[in-house]
Image (cartoon, rainbow, N blue to C red):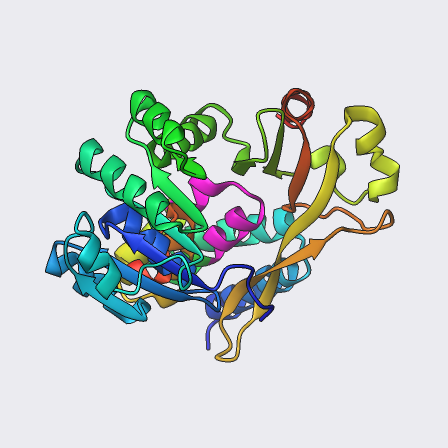
Amino acid sequence: MNQQQNNNEDLWETGKFYFLNNKFDEALKIFEQLLKLEPNNPEVYYHIGLIKEAKNEFSEAKKMFLETLRLQPKHKLAKKHLNKLLGINDEAK
Amino acid sequence: MPEEKYKTFVVIGLGVFGGQIVKFLSEYDVDIIGIDRDEKKVEEVRNFLKIAIVGDATDPSQLEQAGVNAQDIDVAIVAIGESVETNVYVSLLLKELGIKQVFARALNDQHANILAKIGVDKVIFPEESAAKQVVRSLLSPQIIDMFTISDEYSVVEISSPKMFANKMLQELGVRTKYNVTIIGIKRKTPIIDDSGETDTKEEIIFLPSPDEEILEGDVLIVAGKNQDIEKFKKIVE
């Protein structure tokens, strides 16, 4: 494993740690760094979406979940969160 | 599940509105009879119904056959939206049958006045309610959801402002300062789910205690007079 991969993994751990401890602004900073390093990773967009949703920034959250689904159309959790924000219940999917 | 006050419902007209009524009712411990002329519409909600009838509700004998009578039905909901005449006629028929509660959908103000005159127990304006909701959410983006208790009182869901974060309810003195009451807090808690994925779980703290701390991202469920809610909204903008 090279140095870059190690750095990215550290960032993932740190970002998730902040998010799980309700430190949304700190988590967002980390995931925005990851976005520059892994711009095609749907998980980065999904996590930013979760943070935005947790901060009640719904319009930004929707954009992030849409981007997640563009990169990974079968991302179930992104679909679940996007549907909730759009007011579509699970039955209607 | 607690026992419901009303046990047996008949929903007449199973279009979009009637169909939704049936689906929401089916979440409770009640029996539902559904009637519509259109077989397709009946099929769409058949699984939610105790008795599904493809028939004409303007025909008293068909209502009788479906078991629509004062003894067996607690509430009748007339959801017919295509024709004011049919809607009024069926509502009148149900009142004459002596159904305890007749709720009818109104398509406009004139229609509502007629329904009131024939003695329906509740007039429903689904389009008006939905339109009001849309306008409110467009003009007050910080309001997530809202329902009206009366002309004077409402309950709204509102994003908590940053200045409330990490403060206890008693410190904020919302009731004294703004004359509204926080009756609940919706909180999204970050979690790792069973498959190891990051997700959030929503919980509701109902009637929070004065020492409950508001966290960033909380949604406050606020009850109060409309004018006080308007004032409260301004401070959270």
By secondary structure, the bulk of the magenta-drawn segment is best described as helix
Instruction: Judge from the rendering whether residue A28 lies leftward or rightward of residue B64; answer left or right.
Output: right
Q: Which residue does the image show at 50% across and 30% down from the upper left?
A: B141
Toward the viewer: B12 or B147?
B12
Q: Which residue does the image show at 34% across and 22% down from the upper left?
A: B109
Residue B77 lies, with reference to residue B50, above or below; the image says above
Toward the viewer: B118 or B31?
B118
Residue B105 lies, with reference to residue B214, above or below; the image says above
Instruction: Judge from the rendering whether residue B181 lies leftward or rightward of residue A67; answer left or right.
Output: right
Whole-percent x and y of residue B219? 62, 44
Q: Quadrant of residue A75?
A: bottom left
Whole-percent x and y of residue B33? 31, 63
Residue B192, visible in the rendered structure: yes
Whole-percent x and y of residue B201? 57, 63
Image quarter of the C terminus of chain B = top right
Q: Which residue does the image show at 30% across and 26% down from the upper left?
A: B111
Q: Which residues are magenta?
A: A47-62
Q: Is residue B56 magenta?
A: no
Instruction: Judge from the rendering whether residue B80 lies leftward or rightward of residue A63; answer left or right.
Output: left
